[in-house]
Amino acid sequence: MKEKIVALIKGELEKLGVSKDEIIIEIPKNKDNGDYSTNIALQLAKELRRNPLEIAKEIAAGITDSSIKDVVVAAPGFINFYVTSDYLLDNINNVLNLKDKYGSCNIGNGQKINIEFVSANPTGILHMGNARGGAYGDSLARIMKFCGYDVTKEYYLNDAGNQINKLANSIYSRYLTKCGIDNEFPENGYPGKEIYDIADIIFSENGDKFAQTKDLEVFKKYGVEYLTKQIFKDLEEYRITYDVVTSEKSIYEKHPIQNVLDKITENGYLYEKEGATWFKSSELYDDKDHVFIKADGSYTYVVPDIPYHMDKIDRGFVKVIDVLGTDHHGYVARLKSALKAVGYDDEKLSVKLLQLVRIVKNKEVMAMHKRSGNVITLKDLMDEVGVNAARYYFSKYSLDTQMDFDIELAKSKSNDNPVFYVCYAYARICSILKNYANLETIDKYECINEEAAYNVLASVYKFGDVVKSACAKEQPHIITNYVYELASLFHTYYEKCRIVCEDEKKTIENLNLIKCVQITLYNALNLIGVIPDERM
């Protein structure tokens, strides 16, 4: 319907000698203001040098269509559209025919998108920040695929560099303890329980064979293999799989770091100062210059990521999306500057920064410190609240909003728990439909006349627009908010209207209505990685 209204408005704008590529159509919260509304007249007031109310009246006067009951102009220049219910009823069969394709579109037209998310260093088990970034990245990938993009989900495995050296030294220390040898745990080492587990495996397989040699390559190999396997096992349980896993080591074979630095030097963006090599990022997107190579010859954090992003762009993606923690805020300008300095299109890079998550249990915020090993892992969370609750809650808020994850609420079987409330709507429908395996197709819906039914159908109808909006804005929480609204409207409809009644035709129409709600709920929940149960 939005597309039809836009087309009708554009037709009237042509008469005014105006061309407008984008016309915003909104759904008013107050139904008294129509089913759809636009402020196009207000936008044109300055251009046409006319009163917006007069422009609105002129546009409205020329709009006629069988699906539109009335067009009303409201001060200071809004145009409100009241539509007939026929299109809502006609959409029931559309949903029933399209099934799992309902709400999908092809605005992406096969364009290649890369979304890299989680990419946790294999130095520990996944934690809450990874859980939030994982839910966002995977949900965005699902939404963009649903909208016709060719999406590649990628995991960047940091299997080289200083953090792997720290991992090996941490395991070696725990291994020595296992061998009965006193030692001091390395400063800034990784203290998690998993480090003890890896040391136990090495000792059980090799005894004290490596106690004196300190062959760090052995400890690196054991550590990376063990932790990588655990990370992907947890992610799979979290309903996340990847199309590509890229090793940091493999990138250096394609783009040796020295070659990259030589290119940046050639382009005039590196200089020596105080024994270190500095990057002129202040001449590009940053507010100051940064060290690339320290005085001891080691690289700073951003340097190894330059060839990796060069590689992604080389693979032909029109857009490269990174999902990172909020602590990477200063890193974004540096990386975009570096890509530009090496001659690559930095506009292809989009970085999403996820804000912090606080865990609330028994109404108290739980203190978590990664360095002390006191963290709640993704596995802990899934075991306690379930995958559906975890995926739903992490998709409930905009990524740039700090959030509290209330453990007790997420576990509760009450309407206060939004994931329970939404999934209960789905289960209710399944319970009714289990006795009606073969629904009849209806050419014309004539018996549905309740306001609660039309409210549900209007929500079902706008699902496609909601999906497009979530895709365009790259905000999965738009889907989560929508699915809660649809569930709420269905619960109201269920309480006010008899679905199965004495009138056979009305019963069939009602059953088809709730079937299309069931399909829409499932499709929407699937986009955020939630699989609703048929029984609760």
Image (cartoon, rainbow, N blue to C red):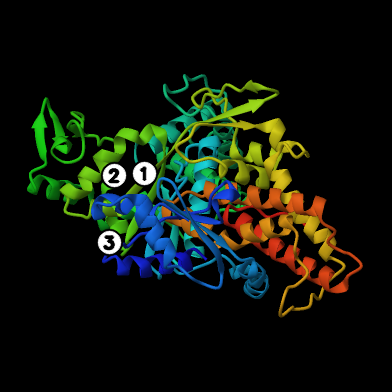
Residue 149, disc: none
Q: Using a 10 Å C-alpha cutoff, classify the residue at mark 3 as few (fewer than 14 neighbours), some (14 to 19) or many (20 or more).
A: few
Residue 160, disc: 1
Residue 304, disc: 2
Q: Nearer the viewer, residue 39 or 456?
A: 39
Across and down, in percent, residue 414 comes to: 77, 38
The kind of secondary structure element at disc 3 is helix
**Residue 431 sits in quarter:** bottom right
In space, the residues marked 2 and 1 are separated at their CA atoms by 10 Å
Relative to 93, residue 380 above or below: above
> Which marked residue is nearer to the observer: mark 2 or mark 3?
3
The kind of secondary structure element at disc 1 is loop
In space, the residues marked 1 and 3 are separated at their CA atoms by 22 Å
> Which marked residue is nearer to the observer: mark 2 or mark 1?
2
Of all residues, the one furthest to the right in this rendering is: 502
Residue located 76% across and 66% down the image = 448
Q: Image check: 164 left or right of 133?
A: left
